[in-house]
Image (cartoon, rainbow, N blue to C red):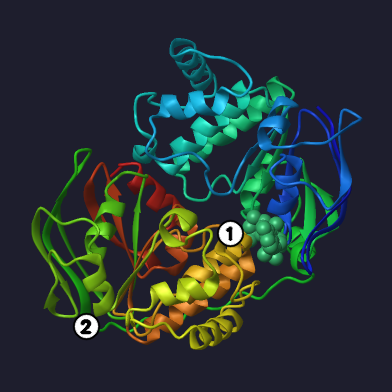
Amino acid sequence: MQVELRDIRKYFGRVKANDGISLVLKPGKIYALVGENGAGKSTLMKILSGYQPPTSGEILLDGQPVRFHSPADALAKGVGMLYQDPLDMPPFRVIDNYLLGRSNSVRLNYKEARNELEGLSKRYGFEIDVHATIDSLSMGERQQLELVRLLAGGAQVLILDEPTTGISAEQKEILFESMRKMTREEGKTVILVSHKLEEVQELCVYAYVLRRGQLVGEQELPCLNEQLVEMMFGQVPKRSQRPPFAVREPVLELQDVNIETYQITVPDINLSVRAGEIFGLAGLEGSGQRLVMQACSGLVAPAKGRVRLGGQDVTGWSYHRLQKFGMAYVPAGRLEEGLVAGLTLTEHLVLARPDKKFFVDWKENRQEMAERITTYQIVGRPESTADQLSGGNQQRLLFSLLNTPLKLLLLEHPTRGLDVRSSDYIWQLLYKRRDHGTAILFISADLDEIIEHCDRIAVFSGGVMSRILDARETTAEELGHFIGGQV
Ligand SMILES: Nc1ncnc2c1ncn2[C@@H]1O[C@H](COP(=O)(O)OP(=O)(O)OP(=O)(O)O)[C@@H](O)[C@H]1O
Ligand SMILES: [Mg+2]
């Protein structure tokens, strides 16, 4: 199906999120839509998928002007979108979620739905357990489920907004294969919104580049990364150097820690992270690294062993008590665990403060938030709600809410969804924290990021912490092998 966008505009008050964008997408190809954080990519794709109407402009499918009244309406007309933040409902079972999502267009019974779900999953190499509940699925599995729902709903045009942030390398490969199949074998039109230029080069044949709401360039792929980067930012941003790390006293110590859940047991964790150290936890999703992080944050209690923070035994302490003591945790699910969609930035600040007062001084907090907005270069106002920010700006918001000083900072996919310039910026902030003696523990699906920024790396596979590596003496390839369980 050929897609044409003509002079699309979307204004939010004074913000021109899309400012006259026109482009054409042909069937059987994978297109890239790139641009810095806040450039207007998600806004444009939400218009193309019926999530929101444009202020003005036209959408044509196979030459016919169309108007979408809702995402379901767009899907019925052939356009489906996988959103940057998943929209499914966690407490439901996979099959119920699926039935709910499908019932708009077709009446399905349980058995038919199950056959359809399993058939499509198999076709695209997805592994979805229909009886599992949504909240037990990984990000990657939830995404596969949503994709199947769109495909079953008749999507001829598929939009994927930042689909590889927060999923494992393995799931990424499966996803890419399915995208190739959709275009090459099935003639679908696929649009990938991504900040990861390597992926864009690998998958897409053509890129459209947005900046400040406008189309500023288009480019056949593959090409030199610098060409895309220059179009995105107007110049090639300089990358900062990683400062050296001086060995200092231990801040976080895990001694014979065992974590048991009904899914997995993580035995005998012994590790010590020092002040100012950046320590990475690497492994396929579900290998135990996230549980270790949650045990350090007080969200999961270890079944055995001791946890010490700054010399104090904090085993069994609650999340809030640890938070007061100087621990902060930035989780992966921005709009699920980290931020609250309808709350303003100022309200987030009030909630994030450890010194909760009975009477809130709104004026003071608004002022403080305005300062943090400047410091963290967030595109938004103290009165904006979290869901009005672009994905990358939501990530900046999370960082702006962290208190100072911190003994321990726990991060999951810290630069997910950030453009090159913004992730460099976040790392500079983290380096500043390390200079103040904060121990940083982080999980990332991006092996290059782990190698580039960590001092040491603990490798997890199948619930076992198999080794601790010196990041300076390890390559991303080697790390990949260890993660895969090879010796
Ligand atoms: N509902 C809304 N209300 C107000 N402003 C909005 C709303 N949605 C988006 N914006 C603004 O429109 C601009 C473009 O946002 P958009 O989410 O399209 O950016 P993006 O290119 O997807 O960025 P990112 O890479 O960070 O996800 C941003 O300045 C954002 O704050
Ligand atoms: Mg976006």
Query: As shown in the figure, which amino acid type bears the numbered disc 2?
Result: Glu
Image location of residue 463, percent across then percent down: 23, 45
Asked whether residue 446 appears in the rendered view, the answer is no
Sequence-wise first label, 2 or 1: 2
Identify the residue at horizontal 23%, vertical 38% (top origin).
263
Identify the residue at horizontal 21%, vertical 78% (top origin).
250
In the visual, does 325 lie left or right of 171?
A: left
Image quadrant of ligand 1 equals bottom right
Q: Quadrant of the N terminus?
A: top right
Q: Secondary structure at mark 1?
A: helix
Which residue is tagged 2?
A: 249
Q: Quadrant of the C terminus?
A: top left
Cα distance in 3D space between marks 2 and 1: 40 Å
Query: As shown in the figure, which amino acid type bears the numbered disc 1?
Result: Asp
**Quick one: 215 or 272, which is closer to the camera?**
215
Image location of residue 190, percent across then percent down: 71, 35
Q: Secondary structure at mark 2?
A: loop
**Quick one: 38 or 218, which is closer to the camera?**
38
Task: Tell whether circle 1 marks a residue whose Cβ is less than 8 angstroms from ligand 1.
Answer: yes
